[in-house]
Image (cartoon, rainbow, N blue to C red):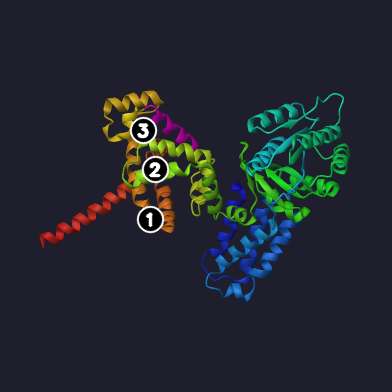
Amino acid sequence: MFEGITSSLQSALSVLGRGGKLTEANIREGLVQVRKALLEADVHYDVATKFIERCTEQAVGEKVLKSLRPDQQIVGIVHQELCNLMGPTDHSLHLRRDGLSKIMLCGLQGSGKTTTCGKLGRMLKEQGRRPMLVAADLQRPAAIEQLKVIGQQLDIPVYSEPPAGTTPLKVCVNGLAAAKQAGIDVVIFDTAGRLHVDSALMTELTQIDVKIQPDQILLVCDAMTGQDAVNSAKAFNEALELDGVILTKLDGDTRGGAAISVKEVTGVPIKFIGVGEQLDRLEPFHPDRMAGRILGMGDVVSLVERAQREMDADEVERQQKKMMAGKFSLEDFRNQMKMIRRMGSLRDLMKMIPGLGGLMDSNPDIDAESDMNRIDAIISSMTKFERNNPDRIDRSRRHRIARGSGTQPADINRLIKDFQNMSGMMQKMAGMGAMDKMRAVKDLAGSGLLNPGAQLASVKKSGKMGPADQRLADEKKKKARKDSKKQKKRNR
């Protein structure tokens, strides 16, 4: 997410931190580079221009120039202005305490509207509501069937009618009546989209708006379309008076322009973001957290929230105790990998930890997902005894495991060696405080030990040592120097 704009902004802001005293001239030069980075990320031209004007006004003041670290002050100004640009936001859907609440979703075809309808229904069901989905998209083939399948997966009722002989307005009116009869308290209308904004679409949506009188009208936008998403949001808002925007596909190769521009251009807040195709991948939008991600500062709060949501607390506690006791096995490691993978891609997760985003950007060849698949294949090819006693894996066992996992015996050696190093460090971390743990995680990532065995590909390609090998070699040299000094003292 936002790889392009993050690297461009970091490059532009790093100019301000290079040697010499900061002056008004080089501050302005640095902010011109920031503006260029925003435009390259498909941020609306007027938004980028006004943003830089506001940043410049604050950055060239005496207070910044005479501060201890003016470059950091300017980064702080850019961060705050990004927060102001994308916020404030209101995550509440303002549902009625009594009676029936009506939410209307609209958007262009391909924006992920039908899937978002299901995600929203799932979120409301988890909050104790009784939602119903209404399939009013008669324009796109299979939209009705898609919503029915989603409803079955979530155990949420779906109202639909055969497309022939009906209209989206009739489906919405009849769906509302069915919801009242069934004791439903939230109805979500999945309306039709088009490939582009046209008068037929707006007329259809306006009729539904007037007749149904929804409590909330939410626009679903594809973040990957950049300024097109902003332009469509503007057109929909002029016709319907939107209450909020849901940005989808923020886990894809998006340049970030839509997230930064849409609130400023339309005045409509971004309420939620879609970060994956799974039906649980809908998150509240937090401008401050998003600004931190865009500037490469990480997002620990969202990472913790995601971990609490996806991980089994009892299982985590059980494994922590095993670590402290030095009984953490390859079986436990595989279980932890499964829990981590439920949280999303490893590359995205590492970017949420301050200081690790740059590590991933500077090593684009690292394919963490493939490495984890390979490790999973190796561990799955072991017997239960071998997973719990990796030190007992001899030559014949290594060859058998290699054949079963489609790897080489050397790969098995490397995995075991890295795992033993990692489990030792994890055992030390178990008794640390929060800040010490954060530093230790950064050390682990830097040494490659967060992903045992991941260095093999780079070693084979280049013939050079990976970070884990280099670290071990350095430790050996350090120990040899200490031993040498001790020996000299004895000789004296």
Q: CA distance from mark 1 to mark 3?
A: 32 Å
Q: Secondary structure at mark 3?
A: helix
Q: Earlier in the sequence, mark 3 or mark 2?
A: 2
Q: Secondary structure at mark 1?
A: loop
Residue receiving disc 3 = 411
Image quadrant assignment for residue 289 = bottom right
Task: Look at the image and say whether residue 163 sits in the magenta stretch.
Answer: no
Residue drawn at x 76%, y 53% is 268
Residue type at mark 2: give it: Gln
Over which residues does the magenta segment extend?
Answer: 367-381
Q: Which mark is residue 319?
A: 2
Q: Secondary structure at mark 2?
A: helix
Spot occupied by residue 404 in the image (x, y as percentages of width and height): 38, 23
Spot occupied by residue 453 in the image (x, y as percentages of width and height): 39, 37
- Residue sitting farthest toward the left: 491
For the residue pair 30 and 55, the one nearer the viewer reads as 55
Residue type at mark 3: give it: Asp
Spot occupied by residue 331 in the image (x, y as percentages of width and height): 38, 34
Q: Which dot, 2 or 1, sits closer to the camera?
A: 2
Q: Which mark is residue 432?
A: 1
